[in-house]
Image (cartoon, coloured by chain):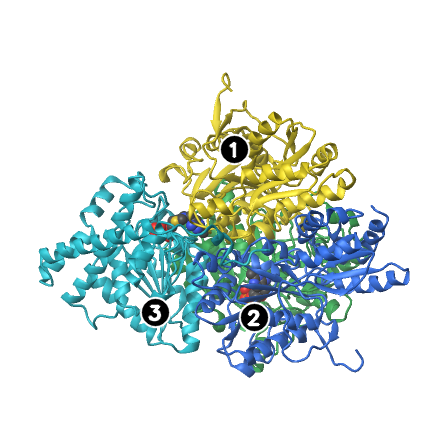
Chain colours: A cyan, B green, C yellow, D blue
Amino acid sequence: MTTADSFSSSVLLEIYRKALLIRVVDEGIRGLILSGNLRIAMHPPTGQEIVAAAMGLNLETTDYLVTIYRGLHDQLAKGIPITLVVAEYFAKATGACKGKGGPMHMTHPESGVMVTSGVVGSGMPIANGLAWASQIKGDNRVTVTSFGDGASNIGAFHEALNLAALWKLPIVFLCQNNRYGESTTYADATASSTVAERATAYGKNMVGVSVDGNDPESMWTAMRTAVVRARAGEGPTLLEANTFRLSGHYCGDSSPYIPKEEMEEAVANDPIKLTREAVIKSGAATEAALDEMKEAFEAELEEAMKFAHESPAPDLSEVETDVYGAA
Amino acid sequence: MTTADSFSSSVLLEIYRKALLIRVVDEGIRGLILSGNLRIAMHPPTGQEIVAAAMGLNLETTDYLVTIYRGLHDQLAKGIPITLVVAEYFAKATGACKGKGGPMHMTHPESGVMVTSGVVGSGMPIANGLAWASQIKGDNRVTVTSFGDGASNIGAFHEALNLAALWKLPIVFLCQNNRYGESTTYADATASSTVAERATAYGKNMVGVSVDGNDPESMWTAMRTAVVRARAGEGPTLLEANTFRLSGHYCGDSSPYIPKEEMEEAVANDPIKLTREAVIKSGAATEAALDEMKEAFEAELEEAMKFAHESPAPDLSEVETDVYGAA
Amino acid sequence: MSEQSTINFTQAYALALDEAMAADPTVVLLGEDIGDKEGGGVFKVTAGLSTKYGDVRVRTTPISEQAIAGAAIGASLAGMRPVAEIMFMNFMTVAMDQIVNHAAKLRFMSGGATSVPITLRTRSGAGSGNGGQHSDMLEAWFAHVPGIKVVIPSSPADAVGLLRACIEDDDPCLFIEDGLTRTVKGPAPGPNHILPLGKAHVEREGSDVSVISYGRPLQEIRKLADQFAGEGVSVEIVDIRTVSPLDTDTIVTSVCKTGRAIVAHEAVRSFGAGAEIAARIQEHAFSSLKAPVKRVASKDSTVPFAHSLELEFLYKASDIEAAVRQTLDGM
Amino acid sequence: MSEQSTINFTQAYALALDEAMAADPTVVLLGEDIGDKEGGGVFKVTAGLSTKYGDVRVRTTPISEQAIAGAAIGASLAGMRPVAEIMFMNFMTVAMDQIVNHAAKLRFMSGGATSVPITLRTRSGAGSGNGGQHSDMLEAWFAHVPGIKVVIPSSPADAVGLLRACIEDDDPCLFIEDGLTRTVKGPAPGPNHILPLGKAHVEREGSDVSVISYGRPLQEIRKLADQFAGEGVSVEIVDIRTVSPLDTDTIVTSVCKTGRAIVAHEAVRSFGAGAEIAARIQEHAFSSLKAPVKRVASKDSTVPFAHSLELEFLYKASDIEAAVRQTLDGM
Ligand SMILES: Cc1ncc(C[n+]2csc(CCOP(=O)(O)OP(=O)(O)O)c2C)c(N)n1
Ligand SMILES: Cc1ncc(C[n+]2csc(CCOP(=O)(O)OP(=O)(O)O)c2C)c(N)n1
Ligand SMILES: [Mg+2]
Ligand SMILES: [Mg+2]
């Protein structure tokens, strides 16, 4: 999926395209939940789309991704077909995981989405293993592991980054710093002023970079640099993408703990809105073309929802398949 | 036990005194083990005595210590009576823990030795709790938690240092970097070139310092600064004391994995030998006085061993006391 | 219940914490998001407490379960009585070293020189659509670790009395809250209601069959007992309350009387707490048993996401009913 | 044994690893100190392997159990068959999240899209003076987690056959080695000896009483069986080999024949694997039982340092003997 060697207006458009798809699916699903038509727990990626889009564009399908419960943007950016994602949200037999994993455990090896984890920080050690396998096999793949700012305070983060640096693994630690972990602020949980500066603790093999994750050019360039570095065998990067969580920790969370001004500013700087403006300004696409793009995604989503809706629930026997019970 | 505000020849002598006591007890116990007269697992602190002595001298009895299986030096420096230590090594009812904990789990609250842990890195989170209690109570105590270089790669280290910095706890993280974790070298396990530089990951509240732990003045001064800082409520220090493990990972380990030259150099720089020379050179004590000191410690140890030897084994009922079994 | 005031489980936990903090200044709370700045906790159990008792006694932590458990242990060694919240039971896995190798053992290993009076509050249970990593009932693990007590309440009043007991206890206690039934109500207890740990509660006397359980299944067992009474079958209900230490005497006495026993829990069947209860019953009441001790539990599988599968995974009230009928038939 | 060559347990583990690495290039090892530069591992099981197969396939790690388990899981998702060494079983507590929430569940949660063919080798057991944090037998925890298999060998030949089976299995397997008996010898197996997982082994047929066990106690049970034979008591020995999944059929068939069962293990008694075995026996062989199923296990306490206390803590051969006699008396 790698689109270009340097940033350009056509890359900008590609970023917007992926980001918009994410926003459309995110809004569609949140709409169902908030209207009572889908009763699931969901952690919306609203506001973090540019980060994911820039990640997805810089990876091949065969590259690996390990993401988290707040993973819809990552999964779509990496290329899981919308139908499989939506059907999984709908808990249907046709979902990516036959309805057994759900949003928090979405897996689709064909797209390189290897693990989605609900335990904060736990994906990083596993991602190392994927990267280690690539190193052993020399298959030239890169692994990206997404996590939040809060996750940078858990032990698994530290063990994983030390090992990755030590073994010079082809991996990118993509911290999506959205300023909150549930309702706790960054500053109340994290002693360092940036997550990226924690790279210092892992020596010269580990690079730490902190960028504006909502700015397409900065984000794409940083991601590209990190992926190229990993693929070249030069070692891992701790890439901190600064962003914001616009729809609360979970769908339905009105975020009363976020100061009004902070939220207002974030909404005013909604990256989908700003990126759309930038695309139009760059001349890469017209307003009309972007409207059409959105309509096409909405149609695609509607199709996926229809498919999911009409799909059968998993057979009850699934409870005892794909697991080696104690018998 | 705080002896002075700045380093002096009398401080040097005090350091030597504590360090020598440790060496005498360490050698005595190793002698018993190697001659087959004591069948226990023991992790000798040989070569790390100055670190412990400087620590002990800068702490009050009421200050807290959390140490590790390689803890004899720390425990003696903090002030556990020799008899209690030796009797515990002998697994006797008169030991610090009635023979139930052993060397790896030595505890003596009266001396401030609160926990000795056999699980690498696990003491640090607990030490935070002691420091947190002091912060809540305002009891002006400082907590020191000792650990090895290898332990700086485990998750608990990271979680503990982040919390300590965030909460500005009155604690000193004393990393005794002896260049090896069992038979693995520092460089094969740790991605950063020093442990102290990992302090960067914990923001401005955490100070990182790397010193020659075998040099009495550097070590004492660094320890003093860290303890003063902690007691003043200015925050934690990650103090890396560079030292060497002269008697292997466990008593009986001939350290075949350590290059000959490396070991020879370390033996030539045995801190007990060098510090003795420095004391004499400083005029703080004569050769004769130091010989006498050693003899006195040897006599004390012999007494302790005799006491331990003659002490009863714990009663078998101890297996089911001090524990809430599942009944 | 008409005269008496009622509270739900969430209110019960909150009440116990509030009472304990008021009664003893060494009681301090720590956990993720628990302060009022953060909305008083994900499950709102601690709402209001940081405002009432101050940020020093109610401390929001980073996402660092090892650091949380360790801080609780350390503070307890220095004379505090910390109550730590581990948001979901599956996250206890992150802190197992602290809990198992330290909290549970320090008193023994120190020869009694120290003790670890901490309470770990956690929450779990399937049925809410949270999937494989947020729903496990792992009480059997902790019950297999001597030195730590394991407590699960089956009513709001018991929740108050048992949580207070955990906090007052000088050993580490694991207090397990059920996610699904958090708004279920029951009679409110009087002030300072404290129950003994390690004592099972025969909450309904009966003569035909003993149903032994703890936590959520009691909600269904109570209804079943009424239903069976209508059929002339007399069910004795034993709520063990404390999974460990287990009150063998009360259980055995009940089964010696009825001659039949069903053990029910939500955790997966194999190697669960029900195995221990069944094993003890047959050890101590062998000659009284008219039928094998039957176990009702969830299936030996991972908790699935799809609700239909989740219900299929879970033990069912009908399983308990069927077990009772089978045991009456001597099967 | 005179003609046949013998090997000890340590040699058996080493042989299985060597054979597995020779047979399958995707088998890789990781763990603390396991390379030859580090002396080939603390227990020398991996000695020579990094020299033979290279540092890429035999990788020494930092002291980071979460990173070790995670790396094994991730590599297995990418087609490798990693064998990770967790030095002592008590340190599994550090990696429980990886093992329980991920290794055991990914196959189910992905709807079968992925699987986790890893083997975790670990070591434990009391009796060596290592005290409270290095001696616990925690197999019952893992057996209570559907999705992970739990294997404990009782002879060097079985060690080879079962470790090979774990490595070839497509699910995560926990392979538990006993520290105390590491130099105990037994007949060497032929090349490529692979045993089935989930199958118990009736290693001695008998008619009066079934003794069901796994791992270390079998050493003593074999001697006791000889001794009882001398007294005219016929003991059937069932070595379950795989704690989970548990081969209920073989156990029940044995007990239905003998009518009497003793279950013995080293882990502490309460909520141990013996409870599950006892519970199943009484469920499936109730009417055949002439006496309650008796359990022999270690005391519900922390493993003490003093050797005399450690022996008092541990189950004893004499406990097994007494249990057999009691059960013959119908007690
Ligand atoms: C080990 C663990 N502890 C606690 C939780 C509960 N929890 C779920 S999401 C979350 C916040 C995570 O914050 P962050 O890492 O910043 O990611 P974000 O949700 O902001 O994307 C918490 C505490 C968990 N899932 N896992
Ligand atoms: C969690 C854990 N993993 C592994 C071990 C086994 N182990 C005991 S000591 C040790 C080496 C520790 O090295 P370091 O931290 O440098 O301390 P040192 O022994 O050199 O003083 C290891 C790996 C352990 N005790 N705990
Ligand atoms: Mg966040
Ligand atoms: Mg070291």
Residue A307 vertical placement versus B212 (above, below):
above
Residue D112 vertical placement versus D190 (above, below):
above
Marked residue chain, label 3:
A
Residue D42 visible (yes or no)? yes
Q: Position of residue C247 (x, y in %)?
A: 68, 37
Q: Secondary structure at mark 2?
A: helix
Quarter location, residue D182: bottom right
Residue depicted at x 77% and y 49%: D288
Marked residue chain, label 1:
C
Q: Is residue C295 left or right of residue A265?
A: right
The C terminus of chain A, quarter of image = bottom right
Query: Which residue does the numbered mark 1 point to in the structure image?
Result: C25
Q: Is residue A291 left or right of residue C145?
A: left
Residue B11 visible (yes or no)? no
Amino acid of disc 3: Asp
Query: Which residue does the numbered mark 3 point to in the structure image?
Result: A63
Residue C297 vertical placement versus D119 (above, below):
above
